[in-house]
Amino acid sequence: MERLLFNRKNLGLDFVRECREASVLFLRHVKPLLPAESSDVSEMMILTKGYYYFLHAAYELAFRRNLPINFVATNRTNVSEEGVTVKVHFANFDAATETLLIGDTIASGETVRVVLEAYLEAHSLRRVIILSYAGTIVGAQRITSFCLTRNIEPIFLFGLAAFGIAQNGFDIAFLHNQTIASPKYLERARSVYHDRGISVAGWDFGSQAQAPKKYHALARIEAHYWDLPQSGLFPSADGPIDGSLVVKERSAYASKISRIDEIE
């Protein structure tokens, strides 16, 4: 987790390998809470970013068992300081069980809430276990509130901290005033992140491997957003920014950057 959350240059296979290792360790921690038989637990993979938790492969490595998978595809239709709107546009719940494992980077918590709501339209659910490399307090609270009103037990495993989230809905940072973390990590973050509330997961987690060109573009915008273009914290500049790649994240930076074509 330290290698994931303190290295914003982590890209490609290095990023993939760190994610895989982290998920194996997450699952070993949660083993006492899992049903004895794999038929009693399944994954809810939230496409596309849930893919980068590699829970199916991690489950095999941790327990030498198969993990059945349900699939759901969502998209954010709006992100602003007022909140986030998420819609489900594809779902396959063929592997439905009463215990679900979800690997997801939890920001507002709205994606998981909407996914569980869709699942409950056809299936019963007793427990949901959420593994998050970077999860927020407000997101966990929203999911917990939803679950408890439906007699579902929510369990969260977060990496290194329970994070606060900035008003833009994207920056999940150690140096947010609501973040709960070990003092050693807060002190380390002051040095690594130049005493700024920079997101440990970037503005589109998973793009580090899924869409490196997009990640480079977003990281370059972040560097200017935080006035750190020469800091070495982010990947080096890689050609002009393709504005079409970062449209969905515009609300992350719009308050400070109006024209990305002016970024050098």
Image: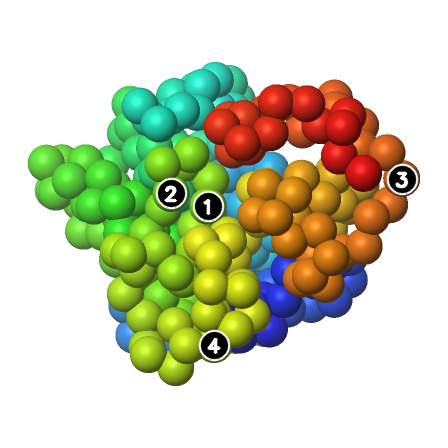
Q: Quadrant of the C terminus?
A: top right
Q: Considering only order in the chain, which callout, 2 or 4, is on the residue closer to the N terminus?
A: 2
Question: Residue 188: which numbered mark, if any?
Answer: 4
Is 43 positioned to the left or the right of 203 in the image? Answer: left
Q: Residues within 10 Å of mark 2 (few under 14, many from 20)?
A: some
Q: Nearer the viewer, residue 62 or 74?
A: 74
Q: Point out the tag, 3 or 1, that comes first from the N-terminus.
A: 1
Q: Which residue is mark 1?
A: 171
Residue pointed to by mark 2: 166
Q: Mark on residue 20?
A: none
Of the residues under marks 1 and 4, which one precedes in the sequence? Answer: 1
195 horizontally vs 179: left or right: right
What residue sits 61% from the left and 48% below the top? 227
Above or below, 22 against 48 in this view is below
- Observer-nearest of 68 and 219: 219
Coloration mode? rainbow
